[in-house]
Image: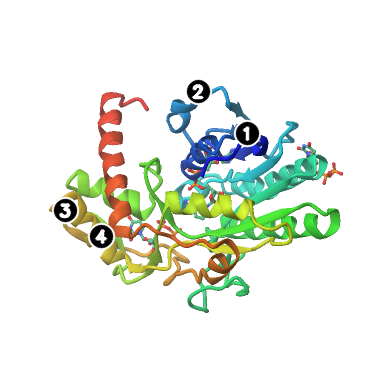
Amino acid sequence: MRRNYDSCKRVLVTGGAGFLGSHLIDRLLSDGHEVVCVDNLFTGTKHNIEHLHANARFEFLRHDITFPLYVEVDEIYNLACPASPIQYQHDPVQTTKTSVHGAINMLGLAKRLKCRILQASTSEVYGDPSVHPQTEDYWGHVNPIGPRSCYDEGKRCAETLFFDYHRQCGVEIKVARIFNTYGPRMHWADGRVVSNFIIQALSGEPITLYGNGSQTRSFCYVDDLVDGLVRLMDSRPSFTGPVNLGNEGEFTIRELAELVLAETGSSSKLVNLPLPRDDPRQRRPDTSLAKAELGWQPTVRLQDGLRPTVAFFRRDQARRSRNPEE
Ligand code: NAD
Ligand code: UDP
Ligand code: UDP
């Protein structure tokens, strides 16, 4: 869908050099908008946005959103935050600051500009859920003091701030609860299950199943997710969310390993390693609200989304072996 020139906006994307952010920027630019990408390059990379530098409607600002930001934009997508356990546990205090101080700064910006702001929240606000599948009215089962808490509680507090700025200051908010998403430009070293399994399969190393691999996740292809974010931003003014965005197809981690082996043609063996602490047993979104409000549902099956993802990692591996310093 290409917009006409009159509806062209200047859009801020925080975390725009990351995996989801860079795909969102591609979509916004192709819809005819101008994009300001703000990122401190903690987990994002310049490679993810290097194809955009020749585009006159794209601008990159290296900035940490825990500090105030004064720019003039029409809309804000707040995606800045490390998303994988290895990365968000690397400096847990900074992770909480990014979610909480970052939300305050971006909400302060939205309040001054009287513009819409969308928060990339997460299924992790449900913790290790005692309700399955998770609907948006489930309040969650989260450990406030464990190793995952900096991320889970930081994102929960960010949601609180979004709703308080909405009620107290009239800021127009949109909150997306994103479930596991995968695709090209995932970071090869982020330790997430899809990237780990593909890299292990491509290098003929053992596939590391944590626990016995019977825990479940649902995996959404990145293009579907980005479409959900854009639809949410464009939804009717009184619709704030939170709304689940994810794929309802539920797979055990062992099933995922088998699909990756089939797609790569690898003969890697499966090995079992200890299950990390607080690792949720089951996770699947109920996406009825997204269907009803946004007319959105994922279209890419896991088997089909793995193909371009594996192709990306093959190219990425070749690039990294040419430039081992990166
Ligand atoms: P990512 O790590 O690839 O991207 C996050 C980006 O934010 C990176 O470019 C990083 O450098 C930047 N960043 C981190 N801290 C920052 C700060 N203080 N100031 C400015 N930039 C900062 O992760 P992603 O998978 O693209 O996730 C994007 C957003 O979506 C995150 O908020 C994440 O919590 C959320 N999310 C992602 C998933 C998923 O499966 N990928 C699931 C749920 C929620
Ligand atoms: N802020 C910002 N850019 C702006 C406006 C505000 O980064 O254009 C930050 C500012 O640092 C402030 C925070 O957002 O601390 C919250 O703003 P708000 O107006 O809610 O609070 P106050 O300025 O009263 O502290
Ligand atoms: N996992 C695994 N092997 C790996 C990486 C992850 O078995 O090499 C498991 C992990 O224990 C979890 C699931 O895969 O049960 C998803 O992990 P990920 O870190 O990708 O996402 P999250 O736990 O945040 O959903």
**Residue at label 3?**
268
Q: Could you tell me residue 209's position as x and y percent?
A: 28, 61
Residue at mark 4: C-beta within 8 A of ligand 3:
yes
C-alpha distance separating marks 3 and 1: 51 Å
Choose mark 2 or mark 1, whichever is in front. 1
Q: Say which label, 4 or 1, has the lower sequence index.
A: 1
Do callouts 4 and 3 mark residues in contact (Cβ within 8 Å)?
no
Q: Residues within 10 Å of mark 4 (few under 14, many from 20)?
A: many
| Helix, strand or loop status at disc 4 | helix
Q: Residue furthest left?
A: 267
Q: Nearer the viewer, mark 4 or mark 1?
A: 1
In the image, 140 versus 53, the foreground residue is: 53
Query: Which residue is tagged 1?
Result: 5
**Place of residue 170 in the rendered image (x, y in percent of width and height, measured from the top left):** 82, 54
| Residue assigned mark 2 | 53
* Badge 4 amino acid: Ala
